[in-house]
Every structure is written in C-alpha cells, then in structure tokens.
Amino acid sequence: APPQIVNFVNLVAPEYQLEPHVVLAVIAQESNFDPTALSPKNAQGLMQLIPAGRLGSPAEYASLAVYLAGDTHYLTGQVISPNGGAVI
C-alpha cells in the first residue's frame, strides 16, 4: 500500500471508530489502492463510491442536516458532495 494512503487512513479512521487495517483491507479489495479506479458500474476511487450524478435539492440537504444532527453513532465518514460527485 502507498505510504501516504496508509498514513492518512491511520490518522483518520480512528476518528470514526474504524480500525485502520479494516479500512485498508476494503481499499485493497475495492481499488487496489488506485485513487483513479473506475468500475463498470461507475463506482469511483479508493472505496469505489457511486456518485449521485446530480445536484442535491434544498429539501435533500435539509433532510441530511436533520439526520446528521440526530443519532450519528454509526456514521462512517462518508463525504457528502453537493455537486453530485463531480470533480470541479
């Protein structure tokens, strides 16, 4: 595994109560540590996430804010992108 990815995972995973070795195992399986990996189903990046492909509506963001303000003990650190996952 590239040391910069290992260092990042070791730094961030504990903040989300995740074991770094588990996160690294998922990355190895999903993308073989290739941040530009793209699956036939359009899953992207190290963790092979699938972007929504559209902008979120105001109601969706309001719902998300309410959700995040509630019971968040099981959040995994998913990045929520308001631009549908597009890289700008």
Image: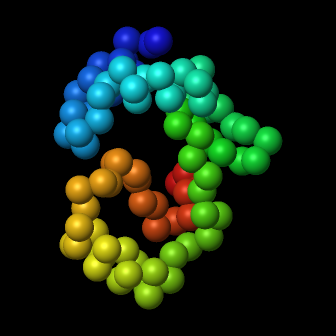
Residue at coordinates 25% horizontally, 43% vertically from top-left? 16
Judge left or right: residue 46 versus residue 5: right
Judge left or right: residue 18 versus residue 88: left
Residue at coordinates 28% horizontally, 79% vertically from top-left? 66
Residue 55: in sight, yes or no? yes
How many numbered marks have been drawn onto this rendered protein structure?
Answer: 0
Q: Which percent across, then down, holds residue 21? A: 36, 20
Q: Which residue lies furthest to the bottom in this view?
A: 59
Q: Which percent across, then down, holds residue 36? A: 61, 32
* Residue 30 quadrant: top right
Residue at coordinates 54% horizontally, 21% vertically from top-left? 28
Residue at coordinates 66% horizontally, 45% vertically from top-left? 43
Please say if 27 is above or below 76.
Answer: above
Q: Which percent across, then down, holds residue 39? A: 73, 38
Please say if 18 is above or below 4.
Answer: below
Residue 33: in sight, yes or no? no
Please say if 56 is above or below 40.
Answer: below
* Residue 80 quadrant: bottom left
Which coloring applies here? rainbow
Please say if 78 is above or below 29.
Answer: below
